[in-house]
Image: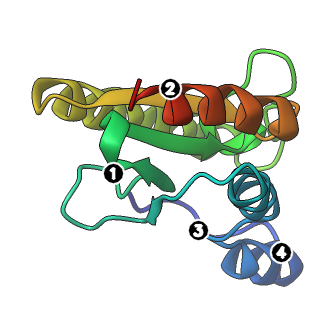
Amino acid sequence: MSGPEASSPQVRAFMQRMPRRNTGPEVLLRRALHREGVRFRLHRADLPGRPDIVLVSLRLAVFVDGCFWHGCPMHAVAPRANAAFWAAKLAANRARDARKDAQLVEAGWEVLHVWEHEDLGEVARGLARRWHDRAR
């Protein structure tokens, strides 16, 4: 999506530095899963949306969503600068999320979205229980 220029060179530089994968919350969840003995794949390009974490044996695609970028109802704050651009951009992000989720479900995958502010240790423990129980 193209839109107006950044409101300042500092904003432009900040946005260019934003990671798209291997974010802090994503890495924390991966570490917690690893401590729980769960093995997983990362960013599988053959799956819609390149899920952050893929538990193949559960056919589960996990996305760790940032509150700003994905519109967390608790924490997302609409930017004041270039408000129309950002409203359209963030709405497009949510629409893209819904499309990729539908594609994954149609392909037989379960989809889990985890907000960056969630207790990632608790999320990992819940996923580990499911992962370890799959063989029973």
Q: Earlier in the sequence, mark 3 or mark 1?
A: 3
User: Horizontal and vertical percent for residue 12?
Assistant: 74, 77
Residue ID for mark 2 = 133
How far is the residue under mark 1 from the one under mark 2?
27 Å
Residue ID for mark 1 = 49
Residue ID for mark 3 = 20
- What element does badge 4 sit on? loop
- What element does badge 2 sit on? helix
How far is the residue under mark 4 from the one under mark 1?
30 Å
- What element does badge 3 sit on? loop
Q: Amino acid at mark 1?
A: Gly
User: Horizontal and vertical percent for residue 108?
Assistant: 15, 28
User: Horizontal and vertical percent for residue 30?
Assistant: 69, 59
Q: Amino acid at mark 4?
A: Ser
Q: Earlier in the sequence, mark 4 or mark 1?
A: 4
Mark 2 nearby-residue class (10 Å; few <14, some 14–19, many ≥20)? few
**Residue 66 visible in the displayed image:** yes
- Residue 8 numbered tag: 4
Decide which of 73, 34 is in the foreground and name it. 34
How far is the residue under mark 4 from the one under mark 2?
52 Å
Mark 3 nearby-residue class (10 Å; few <14, some 14–19, many ≥20)? few
